[in-house]
Image (cartoon, rainbow, N blue to C red):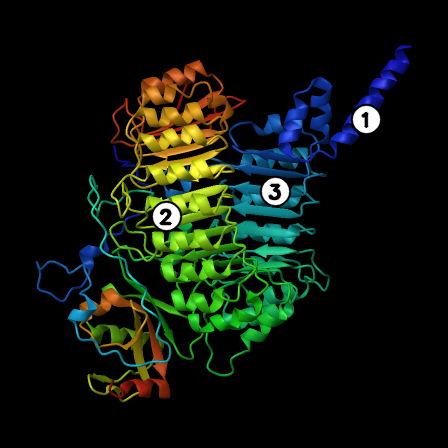
């Protein structure tokens, strides 16, 4: 008998999330394999090595439905969970830093439906203009360029990949300033 | 004639008391107190450090009545599973009755208080701060109920405060936050502070006041900041306190374009640093700043730092003296391999998951686990979260690390078998209990049959704490453990098919245990009632939710007690008798 005693709050943010597809379409949960999608990996200073991922997990026998929320499992203290703000599908919080700003900020990517909304939010948050995105030249018209670190540890220019893929692969954002930012604009 | 024999007796008692002063281990003292009445009295008069493993096992009055001269008190409250939201928030472990008793009984002796999983109010802290003029050390772990107002009272009133350590506490910081750092008397006199740990107090602090406090605390050796302290501020504090031995770095994430302080030189100047933690909002580009301190580090806590393998490698390759290491699984098997290559003296390892969902692949596995076992032969304690594991790797660790005292393996996907063979994980855990002869604490996971428990009952003779979740087939599993493990004191089981028969098989042992927790198992109310009647000094608390039928047991929390059952339980708790 499963424990049905619950003493946590459970925000249902899924009901209010914005999506690109027409109403009724299944939401894509899995990240497409990198080989299938052409990505513009613009070079940056440090590139972290990809963590070797394991072969596919063998399915176990009598598994309970994977999405069922089990209270208190795995046994990680709520103190630790709160500190890490892990992504449980109720929001995709990423840290945003801006060169020169003393503090990091945090935003929930799932609140935005497209790049334009995200960029506007960043412009408001940091009181700056980011400029127009173009595939060939990056961000023109400002000294700032929004970049992000993806799941592989690579630094990418925001806007290079489709929005859905960005949301699921973005680990954190960094608004670069100055020459580093301009360097990103030049082609691969 | 009578007078001289009375004098002789008095001399004997004096001798006994003098000798007992040297007896510090509480187990030895407990044994001494059982010898005879005069030894009981002498021991009670001379005990200065009291440990109470379950706050409801004994009433405050009984404790203060027996021990008139306590200098330090250590009390534990809620059972560990309360940390995982399995208990109602108002369940109990209230410190107030203890606070009142201590204020009354030990005004001129109590110096030190250590509480774990207790519920304290600001009123409790204020009472202590006013009633105990010699109070020096307060250590609160995993506790809650108080706010910054309570901290301010301590800071204001405890002139001799030496240690104020708040570890993983839930401090209410939403309304009326008090500037508690400013409550330390802001004079030119030095404070006695040696340790200030407040990384869990999740609200901004008055940095100027903090800096002044640190500047006038020449004895300060341990300082753990919260995430509202930026790197630039950390740099200033390190400059003020170059003799720190333990440092929690706060956020570790600010970046100023110009001018950026030389963080590395601050770490190089702190030549006494042996323990680093914090990194709450880490910006990995700043990691090189800690390199100068790495060679001396004995303890490193990266468990809030989302760093990858390369970033870890850049640090860990300097850490040859490391004995305690906590980390996130974001470092992958590759990061663990780097640890295994360098940290030959490692005693304790904890690997926490960044993402605790059950259906993902996970960045660490049996590969990193086995690498650790090959490289870190002196390992004594391990806590390892992963998504896949094999019996072979666990067996390897049992052979490579015979000094293991604590083995806690959490395979996050419930009922997961060996990832290679699809077999249950019985053999792996069996090897651990067989080969690790010093093992006292064990947590099991993955697909487990009764066979695994058979191994535990047969070989786990020193085990004191056992954690079980989603495991076992029949009552036999629990029977093996209750009948086979004579040193078992703490047993916590959830979601396993153990029922009344198994419960009854422990009747001979329950008085030796601190507690038994069984939730979502197959117990019936009737069987629990029988146990309550058979063993009158056991308290059986049953916690059910509305969905439970009257006869089912949602949670059974059972513990021995010298006094009547508590009267502060919330309505959702039923105490059987």
The chain that hosts pointer 2 is: B
Q: Quadrant of residue A153?
A: bottom left
Where residue A34 appears, as percent x and y from the top left, is 20, 69
Q: Position of residue B228 (x, y in %)?
A: 48, 64
Instruction: From this view, report whether residue B510 is shown above or below residue A122.
Output: above
User: Which of the two residues, A30 or B335, is positioned nearer the viewer here?
Assistant: B335
What residue sits right under mark 3 in the picture? B113
Q: Earlier in the sequence, mark 1 or mark 2?
A: 1
Q: Nearer the viewer, mark 2 or mark 3?
A: 2
The residue at the point 32 percent across, 52 percent down is B356
First of labels 2, 3 by sequence position: 3
Name of the residue lying farthest toward the top: B1
Q: Which residue is mark 1?
A: B14
Q: Is residue A132 left or right of residue B140?
A: left
- Provide the chain ID for the residue under circle 1: B
Closest to the camera, between mark 1 and mark 3, is 1
Give the CA separation, mark 2 to mark 3: 42 Å
Asked if marks 1 and 3 fall on the same chain, the answer is yes
On the question of residue A179 being in view, the answer is: yes
Q: Which residue is mark 2?
A: B393
């Amino acid at each position: 008998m499963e424990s049905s005693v619950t003493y946590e709050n459970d925000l249902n943010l899924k009901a209010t999330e914005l999506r690109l597809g027409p109403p009724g379409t299944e939401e894509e949960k899995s990240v497409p394999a990198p080989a299938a999608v052409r990505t513009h990996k613009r070079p940056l200073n440090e590139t972290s090595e990809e963590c070797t991922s394991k072969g596919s997990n063998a399915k176990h026998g009598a598994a309970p439905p994977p999405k069922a929320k089990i209270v208190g499992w795995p046994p990680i203290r709520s103190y630790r969970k709160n500190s890490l703000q892990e992504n449980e599908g109720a929001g995709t919080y990423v840290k945003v830093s801006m060169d020169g700003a003393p503090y990091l900020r945090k935003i929930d990517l799932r609140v935005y439906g497209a790049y334009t909304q995200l960029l506007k939010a960043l412009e408001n948050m940091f009181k700056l203009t980011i400029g127009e995105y173009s595939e060939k030249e990056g961000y023109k018209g400002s000294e700032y360029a929004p970049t992000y670190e993806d799941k592989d540890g690579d630094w990418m220019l925001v806007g290079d990949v489709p929005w859905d893929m960005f949301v699921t692969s973005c680990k954190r954002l960094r608004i670069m300033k100055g020459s580093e930012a301009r360097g990103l604009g030049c082609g691969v | 004639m009578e007078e001289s024999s009375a004098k002789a007796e008095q001399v004997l008692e004096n001798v006994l008391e003098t000798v007992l002063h040297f007896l510090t281990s509480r187990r030895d003292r407990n044994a001494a107190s059982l010898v005879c009445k005069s030894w009981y009295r002498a021991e009670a008069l001379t005990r200065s450090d009291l440990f109470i493993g379950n706050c409801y096992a004994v009433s405050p009055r009984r404790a203060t009545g027996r021990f008139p001269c306590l200098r330090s008190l250590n009390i534990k409250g809620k059972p560990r599973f309360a940390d995982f939201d399995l208990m109602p928030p108002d369940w109990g472990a209230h410190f107030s009755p203890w606070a009142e008793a201590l204020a009354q009984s030990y005004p001129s002796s109590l110096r030190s208080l250590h509480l774990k999983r207790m519920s304290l109010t600001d009123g409790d802290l204020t009472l202590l701060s006013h009633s105990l003029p010699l109070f020096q050390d307060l250590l609160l772990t995993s506790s809650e109920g108080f706010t910054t107002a309570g901290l301010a009272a301590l800071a204001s009133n405890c002139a001799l405060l030496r240690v104020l350590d708040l570890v993983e506490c839930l401090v209410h910081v939403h309304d009326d936050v008090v500037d508690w750092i400013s409550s330390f008397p802001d004079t030119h006199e030095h404070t006695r502070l040696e340790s200030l740990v407040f990384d869990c107090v999740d609200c901004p602090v008055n940095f100027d006041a903090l800096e002044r406090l640190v500047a006038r605390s020449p004895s300060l050796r341990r300082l753990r900041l919260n995430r509202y302290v930026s790197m630039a501020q950390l740099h200033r504090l390190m400059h003020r306190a170059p003799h720190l031995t333990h440092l929690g770095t706060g956020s570790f994430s600010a970046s100023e374009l110009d001018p950026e302080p030389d963080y590395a030189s601050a770490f190089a100047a702190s030549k006494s640093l042996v323990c680093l933690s914090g990194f709450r909002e880490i910006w990995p580009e700043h990691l090189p700043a800690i390199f100068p301190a790495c060679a001396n580090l004995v303890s490193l806590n990266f468990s809030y730092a989302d760093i990858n393998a390369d970033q870890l490698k850049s640090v860990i390759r300097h850490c040859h003296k490391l004995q305690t290491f906590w980390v996130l699984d974001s470092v992958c098997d590759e990061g663990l391999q780097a640890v295994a290559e360098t940290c030959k003296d490692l005693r304790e390892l904890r690997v926490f998951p960044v993402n605790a969902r059950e259906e993902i692949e996970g960045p660490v596995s049996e590969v990193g686990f086995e690498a650790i076992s090959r490289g870190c032969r002196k390992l004594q304690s391990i806590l390892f979260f992963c998504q896949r594991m094999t019996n072979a790797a666990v067996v390897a660790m049992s052979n490579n690390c015979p000094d293991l005292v604590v083995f806690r393996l959490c395979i996050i996907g419930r009922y997961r078998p060996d990832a290679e063979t699809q077999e249950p994980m019985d053999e792996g855990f069996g090897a651990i209990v067989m080969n690790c002869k010093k093992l006292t604490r064990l947590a099991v996971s993955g697909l487990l049959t009764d066979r695994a428990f058979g191994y535990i009952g047969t070989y786990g003779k020193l085990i004191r704490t056992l954690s079980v979740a989603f495991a076992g087939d029949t009552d036999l599993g629990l029977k093996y453990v209750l009948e086979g493990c004579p040193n078992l004191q703490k047993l916590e089981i959830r979601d396993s098919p153990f029922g009344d028969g198994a419960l009854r098989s422990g009747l001979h042992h329950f008085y030796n245990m601190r507690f038994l927790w069984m939730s979502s198992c197959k117990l019936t109310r009737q069987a629990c009632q029988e146990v309550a009647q058979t063993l009158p000094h056991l308290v059986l608390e049953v916690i059910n939710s509305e969905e439970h039928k009257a006869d089912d047991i949602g949670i059974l929390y059972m513990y021995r007690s010298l006094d009547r059952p508590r009267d502060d339980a919330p309505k959702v708790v039923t105490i059987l008798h």
